[in-house]
Amino acid sequence: MPKVLVSDPIDQVGIDILSQVATVDVKTTLSPEELIQVLPEYDAIMIRSGTKLTKEAVEAGKNLKIIGRAGVGVDNVDVPTATRMGIVVVNSPEGNTIAAAEHTIAMMMSLSRFIPAANASLKGGKWDRKSFTGVEVYKKTLGILGLGKIGSHVASVAKALGMRIFAYDPFLTTERAEKLGVNLVELEILLREADYITLHLPKTKDTHHLINADRITIMKDGVRIINCARGGIIDEVAIAEAIKSGKVAGIALDVFENEPLEAESGLRELGANVILTPHLGASTEEAQTNVAVDVAEQIRDVLLGLPARSAVNIPGLRPDVWQKLKPYLQLAEMLGNLVGQLAGGRVDNLDVKLQGEIANSESQPVVVAALKGLLSPALRERVNFVNASIEAKERGIRVTETRDPSVEDYSGSIHLTAHGSQGQQSVTGALLGKSEIRITSINGFPINVAPTHYMLLTLHRDMPGIIGRIGSLLGNFNVNIASMQVGRRMVRGEAVMVLNIDDPLPSGLLDEIVHIQGVTDAFVVKL
Ligand SMILES: NC(=O)C1=CN([C@@H]2O[C@H](COP(=O)(O)OP(=O)(O)OC[C@H]3O[C@@H](n4cnc5c(N)ncnc54)[C@H](O)[C@@H]3O)[C@@H](O)[C@H]2O)C=CC1
Ligand SMILES: O=C(O)CCC(=O)C(=O)O
């Protein structure tokens, strides 16, 4: 059974799904050092925002196949390192959208009406009504930074509250904004016009301290700001200063530059107009069930050899597309492996031609599968669908893709040509029926071979006696031939022979075969 580590609190429903296929260890109090120590034991890890999978931690996960983030943001995972190591990273892009959007609205209303402070005052024994006169959101302008899934839901609820919505999102089309009834504007206009500003964008190099002292200066006096996205998008020092000066009338933060927020953080000292929650945006029963199921199912699938639907470091595949591509992925990988072994040395260029029903944009994984096959003799299990493209790039292998939708003999076929230090080799394969894979040509010689674990390939002159001599040699060495195919373009011209053999070739035998008169080359291929 594979082993899965759950290192943050995850809904039981997720643990139950993982337990169908793996031994699950729930350890939610590991220190960073303990995490690094235990990670090598695990095939998968499931986390929320609490666990930091730094470069060092990911590198410690030598056996990890998948990192599952039960939530949206993967900024607590070193994704480039995971990708290099061939670890698929998945998240739950929609499971907590509503929860985070509703928390944002709750924060906006709480800021407007001082609800947390009024509650604390009353519970503290007072009946103070004067200190908590609020403001209405009706007819105010809400500025949304990042109009993705959460930002869009916030926009539609805020519209129902009678607010005017401005949004800044450089990656969004005006058509989409119009559909949402939102004015898409430049950042500066939003900052000048908004009574409330709410952040719903990812934390990246570009969004670090997007809200800083300079940008606060151009905001309206008395603006209120909400951050339920990520700490670090707002400069906490600058915002605390702006609260103290009165420039900003209120802030509501669910996320912080350092989490957990330090006990001595100055933010804790600020008054009734500062609301802090400990990263609760996704903390609803519904969202926790959604993300636990979504991510646990993906971990289960990947451990069973199936694709993940929401991988952030490889293209996701819809189940119907996966079903259709699956035999082609197997075919491409086999052909990549075959052409790589025929090439024998360094490959500089790989031409991939996809023909027929797979000549479409959804077939990109087929190209990756060919690269995986090409690299697998050298890298073995270190190469997979996640890192094959990177590994190829790092080795300087250039890939040229061609797609031709016209159908010839087969409904779909794959042609690979490797150009390398020892010349050019090409192989073609296709599906017979829906899933039987066939090698249909080698270096332009037509054949029809069902690939097997061991194969002997010869390039020879088509003349009487050669096949018999090769067969006798194999017999002398007790190598059993399962089947044989010869391809030639003209009688007594050049030919290729593929022998499916049941046993590996004993050392020295290949040399003897190459020395048979009329044989120009011979290869053993092990798939
Ligand atoms: N507080 C919490 O517990 C939760 C926080 N989040 C965080 O909320 C944020 C938004 O999540 P979703 O809406 O699901 O993501 P999303 O990917 O659907 O939307 C993000 C939007 O930000 C936009 N964007 C990216 N860079 C930008 C930039 N430099 N300026 C302006 N817009 C930019 C994108 O175009 C996209 O439309 C993420 O950071 C996520 O981690 C998500 C769930 C719960
Ligand atoms: O795991 C959590 O509770 C936080 C959720 C979150 O921040 C996210 O999904 O990006």
Image (spheres, rainbow, N blue to C red):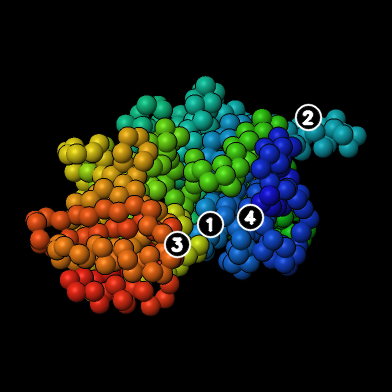
Q: Amino acid at mark 4?
A: Asp
Residue closer to the observer: 293 or 431: 431
Task: Tell me where residue 116 sits by quadrant.
Answer: top right
Instruction: Out of 254 and 439, give the one closest to the viewer.
Output: 439
| Labels 3, 1: front one | 3
Identify the residue position indicated by label 3 in the image.
503
Position of residue 448 measured from the top left corner of the image (x, y, whole percent): 26, 48
Query: Which residue shows up at 59% across the image and 47% down it?
Result: 303
Q: CA distance from mark 4 to mark 3?
A: 33 Å
Q: Which mark is residue 87?
A: 1
Mark 1 and ligand 2: say if the CB distance to the nearest ligand atom is below 8 Å.
Answer: no
Secondary element at tag 3:
loop
- Label 1 or label 2, whichever lies nearer to me, is 1
The three-letter amino acid code for the residue at tag 1 is: Ile
Mark 2 or mark 3, earlier in chain? 2
According to the picture, the residue beneath numbered tag 4 turns out to be: 43
Disc 4 CB within 8 Å of nearest ligand 2 atom: no
- Where residue 129 is drawn, which disc sits there? 2
Cα–Cα gap, marks 2 and 3: 89 Å
Compare marks 4 and 1 and give the one earlier in the sequence: 4
